[in-house]
Image (tube, rainbow, N blue to C red):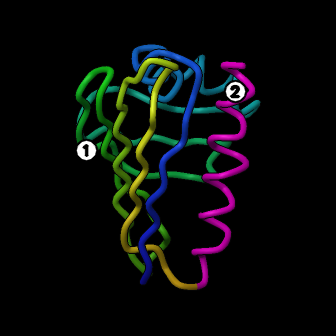
């Protein structure tokens, strides 16, 4: 199992990024795919029309999101997203633990291009 940790710089406020990550309508805008999302702890979610599924664990509005991503029967992976404001926007800290070895490359590329590449386009 592997861990992924990375910081991404976005030209938007923490409130706007939080909204883009938790509002299902906004998620569908930047992903182009169906999404199920709620800010209720212990609620299930689905992103990219079911490509990413899991359970929401914790929300601190405009600051933090914690989720459990499912990898079939192999394992569950914990994703923590923290939003750190700065003068030019927001630094987004992403930490994902317990990633199956054979999924690590796909996950890390997905964070770079699909997830934060799409968010960067939304806010630029």
- Horizontally, residue 121 falls left or right of residue 78, namely right
Q: Quadrant of the N terminus?
A: bottom left
Using the image, tell me which numbered label, if any, was put on residue 123. Answer: none
Of tags 2 and 1, which is closer to the observer? Answer: 2
Q: Are marks 2 and 1 in contact (CB under 8 Å)?
A: no
Residue 17 shown left or right of residue 103 in the figure: left
The residue depicted at 55 percent of the width and 35 percent of the height is: 9
19 with respect to 26 (left or right): left
Q: Which residues are magenta?
A: 102-124
Element at badge 2?
A: helix
- The image quarter containing residue 75 is bottom left
Question: Callout 1: helix, strand or loop?
Answer: strand
Q: Quadrant of residue 42?
A: top left
Is residue 28 within the magenta segment?
A: no
Q: Position of residue 66 (x, y in %)?
A: 30, 45
Who's the residue at 59% across and 17% down the image?
25
Where is mark 2, residue-wise?
Answer: 30
Please provide percent x and percent y for residue 71: 49, 69
Residue bearing the label numbered 1: 57
Q: Does residue 57 sit above or below 36 in this rendering?
A: below
Does 22 sit above or below residue 15?
Answer: below
Q: In screen coordinates, is 58 left or right of 108? A: left
Q: Residue at the location (40% across, 23% down)?
A: 86
74 or 20: which is nearer to us?
20
First in residue order: circle 2 vs circle 1: 2
Q: Is residue 4 above or below residue 121?
A: below
Tally of marks: 2
Magenta segment, principal secondary structure?
Answer: helix
């Amino acid at each position: 199992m592997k861990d992924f940790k990375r910081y991404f710089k976005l030209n938007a406020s923490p409130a706007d990024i939080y909204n883009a990550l938790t509002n299902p309508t906004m998620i569908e805008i930047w992903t182009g795919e169906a999404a199920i999302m709620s800010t209720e702890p212990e609620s299930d979610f689905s992103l990219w029309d079911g490509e990413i599924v899991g359970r929401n664990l914790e929300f601190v509005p405009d600051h933090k999101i914690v989720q459990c991503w499912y990898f079939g029967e192999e394992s569950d992976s914990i994703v923590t997203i923290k939003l750190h404001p700065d003068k030019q926007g927001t630094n987004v800290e992403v930490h994902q633990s317990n990633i199956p070895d054979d999924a690590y490359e796909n996950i890390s590329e997905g964070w770079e291009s699909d997830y934060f590449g799409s968010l960067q386009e939304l806010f630029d």
